[in-house]
Amino acid sequence: SQTIHQWPATLVQPVGSPLSLECTVEGTSNPNLYWYRQAAGRGLQLLFYSVGIGQISSEVPQNLSASRPQDRQFILSSKKLLLSDSGFYLCAWTLEAFGLAITGELFFGEGSRLTVL
Amino acid sequence: GQQVMQIPQYQHVQEGEDFTTYCNSSTTLSNIQWYKQRPGGHPVFLIQLVKSGEVKKQKRLTFQFGEAKKNSSLHITATQTTDVGTYFCAGDNDYKLSFGAGTTVTVRA
């Protein structure tokens, strides 16, 4: 069966510090991978998606970046965090997609709660 | 761009009562998905609707896709404390899955 792991679960970082959130998927190959951010009381905002190794598409301009060094590994990074980067970050994957169109179920990781002080 | 709006934002329900949450899109959707997020948890897929006018049921939950494929609803009957959480709809159009802001449900015992 497929599983998705995301870490760290909780992170408190000072403004201006770097960030690295990691996500790995097990039990499947060539998934579409996504990073979403959820601000308190808000919906899910798509940040990045990837349809293959080394392929990253950005949906929202910001000081975050993403990388996919391996088929089932997706990393979210920042060189210098801002206060506005605080939020709940969710990694997700699906096998059923056409480009960015998700035609099947989206599986989410357990999330990483980031607080920037 | 496409926007998916959900109402109400908050729903306070007496245990045993019914309620409905609504999802509206500014554009026609190819399909719509519903997710549930328990407090402190991550969203979990509930269902996907594809056909115009489609209705699907999962026990006490009834999901409907509008005839014009621009709106959807989730109706829960005989609400239980296990129904607590935030329900999101997500619409797929133009190759992007856009999530609504969610309806956060609390239940009074």
Image: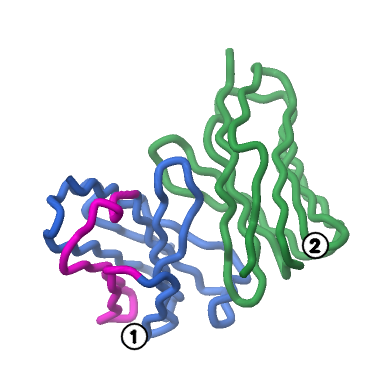
Chain colours: A blue, B green
Left or right of B77 on screen, residue A19 = left
Which quadrant of the figure has residue A96? bottom right
Q: Which residue is mark 2?
A: B69
User: Could you tell me the amino acid type at mark 1?
Assistant: Ile
Q: Relative to B59, does residue B15 appear above or below in the rendering?
A: above
Discs 2/1, front: 2
Viewer-side residue, A81 vs B73: A81
Residue stretch rendered in magenta on the structure: A62-87
Q: Residue at x 57, y 57 (%)?
A: B99
Left or right of B9 on screen, residue A73 = left
Chain bearing tag 1 is: A
Q: Residue at x 79, y 55 (%)?
A: B65
Q: Which residue is at the far top?
A: B109
Viewer-side residue, B95 vs A16: A16
Is residue A99 something that shows in the picture?
Answer: yes
**In the drawing, what numbered circle is on residue A9?**
none
SS at circle 1:
loop
Q: Relative to B89, does residue B9 appear above or below in the rendering?
A: above
Report the number of discs: 2
Task: Tell me if residue B39 is in the magenta stretch.
Answer: no
Q: Residue at x 51, y 74 (%)?
A: A95
Q: Position of residue B109 (x, y in %)?
A: 58, 13
Q: Position of residue A85 (x, y in %)?
A: 29, 55
Q: Relative to B102, does residue A53 appear above or below in the rendering?
A: below
User: Could you tell me the amino acid type at mark 2?
Assistant: Lys
Viewer-side residue, B66 vs A110: B66
Left or right of B94 on screen, residue B54 = right
Q: Which residue is mark 1?
A: A53
SS at circle 2:
loop
